[in-house]
Amino acid sequence: MAAPKTNLAVFRGLIRELRRIYGKEKFHDAPAYTFLKDLYQKHNLTSEKYCRDKFDLMYQANTYLLYLQSTRKHQEISAQYKGSGEKGIEETAKMVGFNLPQTPANDTKKSHHSITLTVNTIYLSIYLSIYLSIYLSQWLRISPSLSLSLYIYINLFISLSPLSIERER
């Protein structure tokens, strides 16, 4: 299991994510930054103020950091694979790294259907991997780094699924 992050490391990670969201100049004026800074200063001496569990505030901060990172990654993936209307078969295949074989004229409908299913499967696997890693992190109360490892294993599992068999055909 990965070593837990220190309070300062989590705070720096949260500030880094806020900087990416609000921009370098404006994040000091953001209400989220003010709230986090005040919360960290308020609980500076101990995490057990108000009879909470020793790692409760740390867990909440790690969960929020994981949420911000996953949201940013989701937006990056959505922007990368976002379509601009209907794409042709060749354009869709090139987007996911496939080369189309030369097919007879009467077999084009079957080929189009197969590629459309493949692209939809890739989209679905990306979204499910991200949301499953967040869900596992919260449900199993594991650290965000372990959740990221699970995310990588899930993607490896998906790459070994029938989708990779279609790629070899």
Image: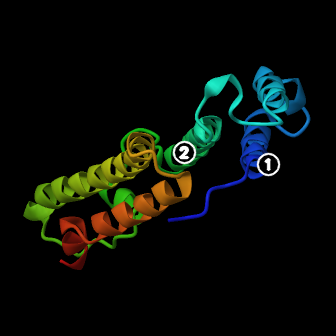
* Residue 95 in view (yes/no): no
Mark 2 is on which residue type?
Ser
Q: Which residue is mark 1?
A: 8
Q: Is residue 12 above or below residue 46?
A: below
Residue occupying the point 61% across, 45% down: 69
Q: Secondary structure at mark 1?
A: helix
Horizontal side, residue 157 vs residue 5: left or right: left
Label 1: how many Cα within 10 Å (few below 14, some 14–19, many 20+): few
Q: Is residue 24 above or below residue 29?
A: below
Name the quarter where the C terminus is drawn. bottom left
Mark 1 or mark 2, which has the lower sequence index? 1
In the image, farthest residue toward the bottom? 168
Q: Nearer the viewer, residue 67 or 54?
A: 54
Q: Secondary structure at mark 2?
A: helix
Horizontal side, residue 18 vs residue 117: left or right: right
* Residue 115 in view (yes/no): yes
Q: Which residue is mark 2?
A: 70
Q: Nearer the viewer, residue 161 or 101?
A: 161
Mark 1 is on which residue type?
Leu
Q: Position of residue 54 (x, y in %)?
A: 62, 40
Horizontal side, residue 94 vs residue 58: left or right: left
